[in-house]
Image (cartoon, helix red, strand yellow):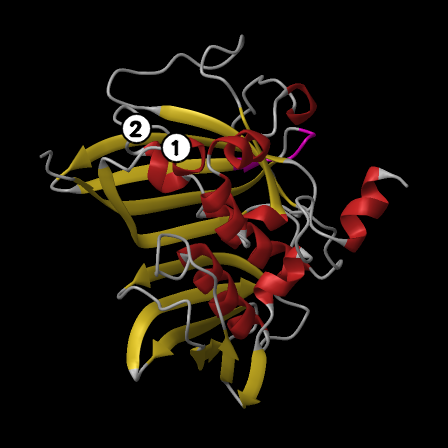
């Protein structure tokens, strides 16, 4: 059986297909319902909440318009034990662009808001930043195998994360851009652990999920390793405050994408991280920016 066929049928690490993480139920016109797994203990994973909110918005748009940007605010921790209702407001339908606003609700309170813009594709001149020369994902170890050995109980609970694949590029890899003083950086290859439908909306929503995996940790790399590689108690309290993305070119989230990330600022208990997604051909396909709550926990 080929690798593609294996990934078609199930998640890489023995869980269900990634597409299940995006599934929502239509309750009524402009009203949807979904459920999200935990990211931090007892908190719904923000990337999945944002991805389902974007899925809800996309269900109210014709297939002739594609997502080009989103802006989201995390207002309250989501409860992974309860369903989330997504209320869609059809703000505008213009000749080229359309706008949707989504409010994610639990227990009658908003936990997340999303504004998303869609447009019809058009031809124009192109330019982009070049992709940094980094080792390919095939040359790098699977961090989940290490995590499973070092922290089997934590790994067993991370059912959502086990339906994707990631490879961390070592900081001393040849060809990496020099790290600027005060600007920690990291480079991670990401893809879903199973094949996805051709639908561009599905691909964009999957990347929205993936984009929230490592941006927050980029702001605190100088203090602690990434959460998926850590086995000791965290020294920092991290939580996404807001999240924005721009989608530049077509891509597949079930093929390897390089996420080049840097954090230019940390202050006032907040950290800012920026990231760029490149496909294997070096095309810049999307950009992301996130502000994160980053508080050091008091030592006893």
Which residue is drawn at the image coordinates 36% and 60% (left, top)? 72
Q: Is residue 19 visible?
A: yes
* Numbered disc total: 2
Is mark 1 in CB contact (under 8 Å) with mark 2? yes
Q: Residue at x 29, y 37 (%)?
A: 233
Which residue occupies the foreground of this view, 50 or 222? 222
First to last magenta residue range: 277-281
73 within the magenta span? no
| SS for dot 1 | loop
Location of the N terminus (image quadrant):
top right
Name the one closer to the observer, 95 or 110.
110
**Disc 2 target residue:** 224
Instruction: Check the image and report above or below for 283 versus 103.
Output: above
Q: Quarter of the image holding residue 295?
A: top left
Image position of 134 with respect to 22: above or below: above
How far across and how far down the image is residue 218, in percent? 35, 33
- Determine whether, in the image, residue 9 is placed left or right of residue 161: right
Q: Give the percent coordinates (x, y) of residue 298.
A: 10, 38
Residue under circle 1?
Answer: 230
Mark 1 neighbour density, 10 Å: few (under 14) some (14–19) many (20 or more): few
């Amino acid at each position: 059986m080929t690798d593609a066929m294996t990934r078609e049928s199930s998640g890489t690490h023995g869980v269900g297909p990634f597409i299940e993480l995006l599934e929502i139920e239509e309750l009524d016109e402009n009203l949807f319902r979904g459920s999200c797994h935990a990211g931090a203990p007892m908190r719904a994973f923000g990337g999945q909440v944002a991805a389902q909110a974007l899925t809800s918005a996309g269900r109210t748009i014709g297939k002739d318009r594609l997502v080009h940007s989103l802006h989201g605010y995390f207002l309250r921790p989501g409860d992974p034990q309860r369903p989330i209702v997504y209320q869609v407001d059809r703000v505008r339908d213009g000749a080229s662009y359309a706008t949707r606003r989504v409010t994610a609700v639990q227990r009658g309170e908003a936990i997340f808001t999303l504004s998303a813009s869609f447009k019809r594709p058009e031809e124009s001149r192109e330019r982009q930043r070049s992709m940094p020369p980094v080792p390919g994902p095939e040359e790098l170890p699977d961090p989940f195998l290490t995590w499973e050995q070092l922290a089997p109980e934590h790994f067993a609970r991370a059912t959502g994360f086990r339906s994707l694949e990631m490879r961390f590029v070592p900081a001393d890899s040849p060809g990496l851009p020099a790290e600027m003083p005060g600007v920690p950086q990291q480079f991670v290859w990401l893809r879903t652990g199973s094949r996805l439908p051709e639908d561009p909306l599905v691909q964009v929503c999957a990347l929205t999920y993936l984009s929230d995996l490592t941006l927050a940790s980029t702001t605190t790399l100088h203090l602690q390793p990434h959460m998926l590689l850590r086995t000791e108690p965290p020294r920092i309290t991290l939580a996404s405050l807001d999240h924005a993305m721009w989608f530049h070119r077509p891509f597949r989230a079930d093929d390897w994408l390089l996420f080049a990330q840097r954090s230019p600022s940390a202050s006032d208990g907040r950290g800012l991280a920026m990231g760029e997604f490149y496909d294997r051909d070096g095309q810049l396909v999307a950009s992301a920016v996130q502000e994160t709550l980053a508080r050091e926990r008091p030592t006893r």
